Image (cartoon, rainbow, N blue to C red):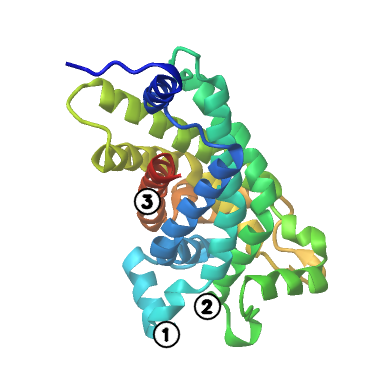
Amino acid sequence: NETTLSGPLQHIVDRKREMSGKKKEQPNYVKFIVGGLSGMGATLIVQPFDLLKTRMQLAGKGGAAKVSFVQTLNGVIKNEGFLKLYNGLSAGLLRQATYTTTRLGVYNALQEHFTDPSGKPPSFALKAAMGMASGGFAAMVGNPAEVALIRMSADGLMPVAERRGYRNVFDAIFRITREEGVLTLWRACTPTVVRAMVVNAAQLATYAQCKELILKSGQFKDGIGVHFMASMVSGLVTTIASMPVDIVKTRLQNMRYVNGVPEYTGIVHVVKSITGKEGVFALWKGFLPYYSRLGPHTVLTFIFMEQLNHAYSRYL
């Protein structure tokens, strides 16, 4: 028989039971911290693929000989050393600390705001809109780190005398500001924002929708396996949708001025140059390292995020 309690003691027991049935709500600042830490953790693992993607996107400009993923990988290791695969890691981490912290923090806050009081999640279209809004805003915040990352990753392609030789992301940002002006840190901001909107609309919405459908099937329980499946599908869709904008962004952020004349005059010029000299499919140049980076990065980011959220709810 259950012992009957009364007075203050019964009130405490009832309150604990009530609280145990509720999911602990996170303050907004925690959402931002979790988002940033998740992205930074993933970047520590997949940074080499980001460098290889950038090298392939910049190789073969003007119709020069194309290089494969394996050729690019072998070239970096043979000519520069294995550790050069992590060149630009500091910029990659700063990018995650600014861009990913903002986009995942804003997206999670919006998702909570638009979730029905009954617990019904937002529609796919609304998820996509939230992804675009959070991604576009985050891209503006993270653009300086993005410029530094592209330049540091691409440096090994240049002749030794022409290399920029940034020591780390802070050296890169300082020198860019001093030598080219502070606005250069926001070079190619428009395609960066467009890419981020495409990536986030595809990645965040597709991940949430896939996870929802997998769980609805009743064949799987929520856990790392479900997060992995949803992330891989999300990464594939995102890669296909965002690569053309990404290569335009990369070319613009790495371009040089010759006698005061820029290599490209704008987005349209880059697209015409790529499709005219390298072919339409060159817009998806570097697909394998891009997906090899984005797929695992998506998987790891969401797995880290889910686990950090779980740890927060359980221990804090």
Which-is-in-front pick, marks 1 and 3? 3
On screen, 75 above or below 277? Answer: below
The N terminus: image quadrant: top left
Residue 80 in the image: state x and y as whole percent: 44, 84
Q: Give the residue type at disc 3.
A: Leu
Q: Give the residue type at disc 1.
A: Asn
- Number of other residues with Cα within 10 Å of mark 1, as a class: few under 14, some 14 to 19, many 20 or more: few
Q: What is the distance, in whole Å, between disc 1 and disc 3 at their CAs?
A: 30 Å
> Who's the residue at 70% across and 57% down the image?
264
Which secondary structure lies at badge 3? helix
Q: What is the distance, in whole Å, between disc 3 and disc 2 at their CAs?
A: 28 Å
Residue 300: image tag: 3
- Number of other residues with Cα within 10 Å of mark 2, as a class: few under 14, some 14 to 19, many 20 or more: many
Q: Which residue is mark 2?
A: 156
The residue lying furthest to the bottom in this view is: 161
| First of labels 3, 2 by sequence position | 2
Residue 79: image tag: 1
Which-is-in-front pick, marks 3 and 2? 3
In the foreground, 310 or 140: 310
On screen, 14 above or below 141? Answer: above
- Say if mark 2 contacts mark 1, CB within 8 Å: yes
> Who's the residue at 56% across and 69% down the image?
90
Residue 51 in the image: state x and y as whole percent: 47, 66
> Who's the residue at 38% across and 58% down the image?
289
Residue 313 appears in the figure: yes
**Left or right: residue 262 compared with residue 202:** right
> Who's the residue at 40% across and 61% down the image?
46
In the foreground, 216 or 298: 216
Q: What is the distance, in whole Å, between disc 2 and disc 1 at their CAs?
A: 9 Å
- Number of other residues with Cα within 10 Å of mark 3, as a class: few under 14, some 14 to 19, many 20 or more: many
| First of labels 1, 3 by sequence position | 1
- Quadrant housing residue 160: bottom right
